Amino acid sequence: MSNQPLLEVKDLTTSFFTSRGEVQAVRGVDFNVFPGEILGIVGESGSGKSITCMSILRLLKNNGRVIKGSANFEGQNLLDLVEPDMRKLRGNDIAMIFQDPMTSLNPTLTVGEQIIETIITHRNSSRKAARQRVIELFELVKIPEAASRLNSYPHEFSGGMRQRVMIAMALSCDPKLLVADEPTTALDVTIQRQILLLLKEIQSRLGMAIILITHDLGVIAEAADRLLVMYGGMVMETGNVDIVFAKPAHPYTQGLLTSVPKVNTSNREKLLPIPGSPPDMLRPPTGCPFAPRCLHAMEVCVEEVPPSFELEGDHIHKSRCWLRHPDAPEAKGEAA
Ligand code: ADP
Ligand code: MG
């Protein structure tokens, strides 16, 4: 893995301005994405995962605004680009896959026509070359009988196959970064896994970087290299996937991991959700956003947002938790 990040996000802060007040959706998020890695982002619904990505891709709804921060992609700050430059980048270097392919596919055109059009526009290729490329992409995403499926309309595909079409479309311009935001949530669990693992396989063949937002911690464990755990608009923990799963440092991550159903048991175990509910981002807590639900909360946790502490001996692994302060009573050992 190269040491030079492909994307470097610093202090990203995004709010929505609503009739009820300012919703502080993203509050000072820092992270890097290195070329060729899969970065997983997890966290309960409302923790700011999508808005982090939408801010970077500059796809916020009209009432949303990036208040501060930067997002350097190969040396240029995406947040400063004029819209036409940003649009160009979105079609070429950065691609996206969203949850519902029906909203991104044009129901009136065959899937072949749509992707061929995209390739012709972005790559200046001939129709014949573009068509050949689509067949290759369909084979890559394992759509059976690729050549004939080009002539089908979106509604003629199953949900899972439609998602494969979306992935093929996203890959059509050889992106350096692919942002996949819960791309499979609408699908059956087994198909979800197939698609997410397909993404991993494609990544290892094509070598682009992927930001993968998913609820499926099992898939993150199998597919991602590094992990960001988000809560209340902040990054609570980050590190290499193996390490974070083996030794989660943040009480929130520990809670998330114990709420994962076991995949390989026939009677799926009941999810044990973390008691309590996520903060209201109109009035986020003064201190650690997780403090009201945290079994280990100390006085300082309620009063002040903790900094991100590096874990001993692992500069990649960080936890935004006062328990990691050198003077904290439980700093030694895992907060269990
Ligand atoms: P998730 O982690 O589930 O992807 P989001 O990033 O979508 O969460 O949302 C973060 C916060 O921003 C949530 O509190 C959500 O309600 C709020 N939010 C998202 N979009 C808007 C909007 N258009 N207007 C107001 N609040 C919004
Ligand atoms: Mg989301």
Image: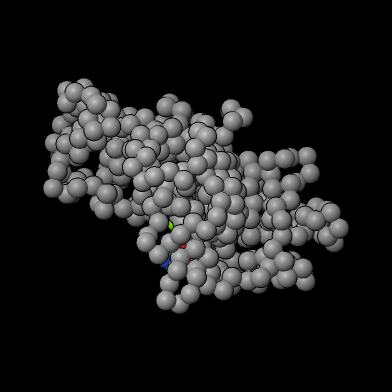
Q: For residue 145, what is the image quadrant?
A: top left
Quadrant the C terminus occupies? bottom right
Looking at the image, residue 10 lies above or below residue 74: below
Nearer-the-camera pick, 317 or 92:
92
Name the spot of residue 68 as percent of width and height, x first. 55, 55
Quadrant the N terminus occupies? top right
**Can residue 122 be seen at all in this image of the molecule?**
yes
Name the spot of residue 60 as percent of width and height, x first. 40, 56
Residue at point 13%, 48% (across, down): 108
Residue at point 36%, 49% (across, down): 98
- Outermost residue, bottom direction? 20
Looking at the image, residue 21 lies above or below residue 242: below
**Left or right, residue 84 beside residue 55:** left
Residue at point 28%, 32% (across, down): 122
Name the spot of residue 265 as percent of width and height, x first. 50, 52
Ligand 1 shows up in the quarter that is: bottom left
**Left or right, residue 85 beside residue 157:** right
Name the spot of residue 102 as percent of width and height, x first. 25, 52
Nearer-the-camera pick, 56 or 301:
56
Looking at the image, residue 207 lies above or below residue 20: above
**Can residue 214 be seen at all in this image of the molecule?**
no
Nearer-the-camera pick, 198 or 174:
174
Structure colour scheme: one colour
Instruction: Count all numbered tags in the image, as a single digit.
Output: 0
Residue at point 42%, 27% (across, down): 206
Nearer-the-camera pick, 72 or 144:
72
